[in-house]
Image: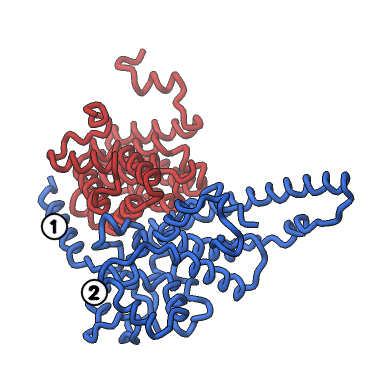
Amino acid sequence: MENSNEDYKIQSFDQDTQMLLKTALKDPSSVNLDKVSNIIVDQSLKDQVFSKEAGRICYTIVQAEAKQNNGNVFRRNLLNRLQQEFKDREETRGRSLQEWVCFVTFICNIYDYLKVNNMPMAALVHPVYDCLMRLSQPDALMNEEEVDCLVLQLHRIGEQLEKVNSQRMDELFFLLRDGFLLQEGLSSMARLLLLEILEFRAGGWVLSSTAHKYYYSEIAD
Amino acid sequence: MSNWIRSRRRDAHSSDNENRSEGPSRWSHCRKRGIDGSLRSSRDGGDGVNNGSTDSRDRHSDSRHASFTTPESRGPVSRCDRQGDWGSQVEDAEMRRDVHRDMQRYRRRILGAEVTQRERKISSGSSESCDSREGENMETDEAVLLRRQKQINYGKNTLAYDRYTKEVPKHMRQPGVHPKTPNKFRKYSRRSWDQQIKLWKVKLHAWDPPAEEGQDKVLDNIDELGLDDVMDIELDFPTLSDSQNATVSLTARNISLEGQGEDCSGTPVKVQKTEPSAEPDMA
């Protein structure tokens, strides 16, 4: 049990909440799943580490609920709450960059983990793209935090996103090339991240070994 | 960093929930799940994801259920809006896939039947070939199939159905005696299909759990008045049992009584995985 606790990264919750989440994982119908989904979203929006892995716990609860009574209350609540946050994203970004970055990380993680019959959820494709496009606007490229988030998401789900809708991926990369090439005032760290992701996609969502060496070895020859 | 904003928001959210809580409707006792798909037994308050409407208006001062009266117009819709939320979108997609999967399975089964038919023909020379007609008369219109699946899911989303499938194992079921799920892949007129669904649900009601004390006052009265038939139709309205969650215009629904109003209602919330063994068995 301690182990699963570790896996889902729920140690940062208080004891009661940890109990609630553990029960939700084992016996979802016995808890208020609306509350559970809100707790998970709330935590994701303020905890960057959690937002990167929250999809996994969500996936497990969804599976458990489907198995137990063929239900999908949790998924429904989760998605609708997510939709609400998506609607307010510009406001969120204005209020707190960190929260905005957490939100993007979370929605991408959900996209990555929650599949319906092994297919990505179509409802999330455009919202995810919208978020990534937002991160690729000139004002966002000025913030390393946002560039870092963008690049991380593309590393994780870029390939599957492109499979579902390659046109929007093309549009996204037009923005990224322009940003890399033309935008003034971009930090060299941001340029490095952009260059890497451009190469990454150009290589079919893999980094060639020489490129990997270039970006990741401590001392380049 | 923004902790205080978060917690403030969360507070706002939970008070939302309190405002939303409503009692179950009178008909809801035989529903396994509410509009949001939550099990009633565990959360009878049914704080579903709704559009923040409802309350008070469901109960009338003369203790009649809201659906017996014409509500002051709030406008129709609201249930149609639900199609826009991500949860519903994903559920719809899921149901569409399930229906397509069922269709493939049904086709395979017809083919299998044709093969055995042919073999039998060769050996016995008999000419009964009703099964081969089946393939040509198959309903393939996705819209129709989805509508029918929703109606079926709605009937299966009942305690009565659970009790029935538990109490009467498949091989014990007799045609004409036991309820049999209508075959959604057969060509039927809209009217015929709706009638089959209605009769199926009427039969299923025989397995309704025993009513709790005093819970069914209204129902009992109706029985005394000899209006059971009307009530059965009424009970079939998807929205009735969940009326506190759905601000459906009742007037509109009554007008479209023939269609039983399931068109835009998004009927059962739970997208049920049709059990592989249960479904294609109805031909």
**Residue at label 2?**
B55
Chain letter belonging to callout 1: B
Circle 2 Cα neighbour tier, 10 Å, few/some/many (<14 / 14–19 / ≥20): some
Mark 2 residue element: loop
| Location of residue B68 in the rendering, given as x and y in whole percent from the top left corner | 35, 84
Tags 1 and 2 both on a single chain: yes
| Location of residue A58 in the rendering, given as x and y in whole percent from the top left corner | 32, 42
In the image, is B75 to the left or to the right of A14? right
Q: Amino acid at mark 2?
A: Asp
Q: Which of the two labelled residues, at mark 1 and mark 2, occupies the earlier sequence position?
A: 1
Camera-side residue: A20 or A8?
A20
The disc placed on residue B199 is: none
The disc placed on residue B11 is: 1
Residue lying farthest to the top in this orientation: A221
| Quadrant housing residue A20 | top left
Q: Would you say residue A150 is visible in this rendering?
A: no
| Location of residue A31 in the rendering, given as x and y in whole percent from the top left corner | 24, 49
Camera-side residue: A90 or B15?
B15
